[in-house]
Each structure stands twice: as structure tokens, then as C-alpha cells.
Amino acid sequence: SRASPTCRNEFDFQQDSCGVRDMKNLSMPRFLYCVLKYFSVVIFLVSCSAEGQVDWKVKPQSPALRASVEAVKSKEFPNAKSSLRDSDLILEKIKALESTISQLQKNISTSNSIPAFQSGDVSWILTSSALVFMMTIPGLAMFYGGLVRVQNVLSTVMQSFSIACLITILWVLFGYSLAFDTGGKVFGSHQKFWLQKVKLTGFHPLFPSIPEPLFVVYSLTFAIITPALISGAFADRMRFGPMLVFIGLWHLLVYCPIAHSTWMTDGFLHSAGVMDFAGGNVVHVAAGCAGLMSSIVVGKRAGYGREVFSHHNILISVLGASLLWVGWCGFNGGSALGERYPGQPTGVTSGLAATSVLNTNLAAATASLTWMCTEWMIRKRPSVLGIISGMFSGLVTITAGAGYVNVTGAFCMGFLAGPVCYFAAQLKHRFGYDDALDAFGIHAPGGALGGILTGFFATEEITGKGSGKNGAFYGNPKQIYLQMYGVAFSAIWSLIVSYILLKLVDMTLGLRVAIEDELSGLDMVCHGESLVPFHLDPDGNINRSSLELPRSCSLEADVESSPSKQGEGNGFI
């Protein structure tokens, strides 16, 4: 029967794959040919698919088709292979970074959070500590030892040496904590007595790039030389035991509070804006004023003003002065590490240490020449003692501003230091006090002059832009009054406390040796040693006549009035 239209639409084709236009008009042979053709193709595809050899999209069987497919892929994904390689490299780098980070975490955990100190700073402060310690022994000991009379050389050297030992113990016990621990406006706290909280891995806020034990050592050298300077004022006449008692008390009650007030951030002088780079007030003004009080309370040497006291050996003093000059490079240069200014790198690499050393040497050389020329004009000849005293005055004066002024300021400070300290040293002849080795005449006026001139010459050229540490010549006249304030406090505190301590020691122990002992020399009386040949009598006592000390006048009246003749000696010498 004839098929319905619907069926016809389903079975009729516009054209079959064999080119037959109408199925009903297809002949039997032609029909069988088409069926076999399509059936063979289906069998072939099924068999190849079963063996996994056909993948029309990925693995075409025809080499030409495979090449065309690869070309199409390369056009569609030109960076596919390179992207895969880059991804592998990135993964490898990430794994390497993860391994490095884990190793760093292990190192940090095992290092117990030890701070990274700067090796250059540590080396420089170690060197500076040795240089400053050398300033006291042997530098100051030789300088003073060569200036006293021959019968007092060993006692003078002994004073410097014993002071170094005493202050070292007191510094560890109490001094460091009182001076450089946070606490009050004048004194530190008791938290670091006997260095209890000073750790190897810790640091002090003033010197954060070095271990705190090293800062303890460096600051100790300043604490040692300061009271040792005082001994020049009472040379030849103070008893050894009471001298140690006075120096120990002076260290705790004068040096420590002035150091804390000036250098610590909670000190009232530091908070007020007083500038003292390396100890113009703390070291020199304080020591000089204490020397003045010592020379007044202890009294004059026997024969002072009537005799010419010959120096033992100026050459030894020159050697000592040379060591002082070299050591002062560490004194001022090491102090640069405690300054941190805006815009400057930390540590001594900022160049501040080099600037401080340069200013120190320039001021010392200039003051040496100006003292020499002043003496030359007045006494008609320059002396060796004069030029080394001028060097000392220049070093004292530049101390307060070594890291605040430029070379112009350093030159002007040295230029004024020579004549000012020269005339200040002559005041003892006018007012009658016996400052034996000019401890007051050089240190107090020189330290005060340096502190005040720092208020004129300080400049941000050195201190760093934004530090605010400018002097009057650079737009900050207020700094002059602040510097005078710091000098006045240091001087008054030292004068008053020193006088009280000297009186207390004198009333309890006695400060002055007997006149006859002074004439014989402190070397034999206090220490049983002497550079002068001597003999003992049959009882083992010193034969004083064997000392054969040349004298220019008779002092029988002084001997008769001595404490030993009146039975007042207590034997603590």
C-alpha cells in the first residue's frame, strides 16, 4: 500500500549518501551496496575503538590529519608548552622558598632571639674602651707623676692606679645603675645593682648596636678618669686612706647623678635640651670644681708661695700627655655611638665618630699653640710644660661639643681654650689656694668654656637635619642659656657636695698628712717606697736626714705646728 504523507516525510530524503534521491526508486543491488558500505564502516569504527587506536580529536589515524590537528592546536594555544614549563619552574621556586623559610624559622627559634649587633660598632667601642682606660693608667698617672716632686712620684701614680681599681668595683656594685638605669630625674634606679639585669643579649638604649656589657665597660672608663683628675689638686699632701674614702663617696654622690641628669633620657638636664657630647660638664666641670674644694679644704703644701717646687721629670709628663691625646680620640670618638640623628644611618658608619676625632685633634693642636704663644709673650719663652698644658686645655674644651660643631667651631674653641685656661691657672697665685697640678685651673674653666661655646657653634650640619641641635650662630640663641644652665648645675652640685664630703672625712679620719711627713715625702710615709735613696735607723725607722731633699728655706715653724707634733695623727694614711 501507499505510505502516508507523514511516513513519506520520514523516509524520503533529499539525497542519500549513495546519491539516491528516493528510497522507493532504489534498486536492490544499489540498496545492498549502500547497506554493506555503511555496515563495514561501523564495524571498522567499533573494532578500532575497542583497541584504543582511534581518537579523532587527539590521535587522528592519518598523518596528514594529525599534522593539521597539531597546527590547529598551535594556533589556538601558541604558549601552551611554554606556560607549562613556566608553571613547573614557579612550583620549584615556591618549594625552595618554603624550605628556606622553614630553615630560617628553625634558626630563629634556636638563636633565642639574640639581637643583631653591628660588628663595626662593637669593634670601635672595644677599641675606644681600651684607649680611654689608657688615659688614666698609664696616661694620667705619668702626666701627674712627672709634675710632682721626686719624693711623691710613687704616691701620685698609686693614687691613679688605686682609683681605677676602686671605681671599677663601685661601678659594678652601684654606680652603673645609679648613672645609666632609668629611674628619676637625678639618679637612676637600683634595678641594676651588681649588674643583675645586664644580659649578654641585651643592650642599653643609648648604645643599641652593641651588647650592654660592653657599654658597661666603656662608661666605666669615664667614671674612672673623672675622680682621678681630682687627685692633681691635692697632690703631695693628702693621706691615702681618707683619699680613697672621699673618692668613693664622690663617685656615687657627684659623678653618678650628674651623668644621669645629663645623658639619660629621663635626666632633667637632658630633657631641658642641654648638650654635652662626651662629658664637658659630667667629667671636667665636676672634677675641676671638686679639685678646687679639695685644695681649699686640705690646705696649701708646706712652703707654697715661698719655695719653687721642682718637677720630677717633664719628659715623663710629655709621654703621659701624648697618651692622653691619643686616648682622647676614643673618649670623644666612641661617644659618637650614643647619638642618633634624623636622616643619619645608625652606628659609627654615619661619620660622626670621624668628625668627633677630627674636631678633637684640631682643638688640641690649636690650643697647644695659643697657650704656647700666650706664655711666650708674657714670660718671654715657651715651655714644654706650657705646650702640653695647652694640649690638655684644648682637649677639655672640645669634649662638650666634639660631635655638635664643625671644624670652624672646633678651631675657635681650641683658639680660645689656650689663653683662657692659661690665665685661669694663674688665679691660684692671686687668691692663694694651692691647686698643685692645675686640676681646677684647666678642667673647670675649659669644661665650662666648651659647654658654653657649644651653644654658639652647634649646627645641624653635623647633628643632622631636623635634630634641632643648633647654636646661636645657626639661629638658636636659646641654646646658650641652656648650656649655661647645665654648666652652673654641674659646678654648684660638685662644689657643695664635694665640700660636705671633704669636711666629713676630715672630721672623722683626717685628710692632711703631718708636715714632717709631707717634707719627707708621701712615697716613704704612705707606701714605704721611694725613688730617693734612704736609710733606716737601728729601730727600723726611716732616717729622714738620709733623704737629702734640697730645700730653699727653713720650715721649723710649720713642723712644730704639724698634727704629728700635737699628737693628732690616727695612723690611717
Image (spheres, helix red, strand yellow):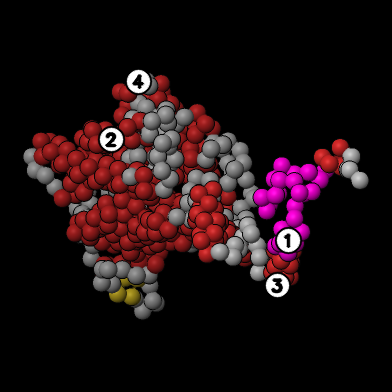
The earlier-in-sequence mark between 3 and 4 is 3
Measuring 43% from the left and 41% from the top, which residue is drawn there? 339
The residue identified by callout 3 is: 51
Mark whose residue sits in front, 1 or 4 = 1
* Residue 42, percent from left and from top: 73, 63
Does residue 98 show up magenta in the picture?
no
Q: Which residues are magenta?
A: 10-37
Distance from disc 2 to disc 3, alpha carbons, whole Å, reads 93 Å
Q: Secondary structure at mark 2?
A: loop
Q: Secondary structure at mark 3?
A: helix
The earlier-in-sequence mark between 2 and 3 is 3
* Residue 204, percent from left and from top: 53, 49
Around disc 1, counting alpha carbons within 10 Å, would you say few (fewer than 14), some (14 to 19), or many (20 or more)? few
The residue identified by callout 2 is: 406
Measuring 33% from the left and 35% from the top, which residue is drawn there? 462
Q: Are marks 2 and 3 in contact (CB under 8 Å)?
A: no
Q: Secondary structure at mark 1?
A: helix
* Residue 232, percent from left and from top: 34, 50
The image quadrant of residue 147 is bottom left
Farthest residue, direction left: 380
Mark whose residue sits in front, 2 or 3 = 3
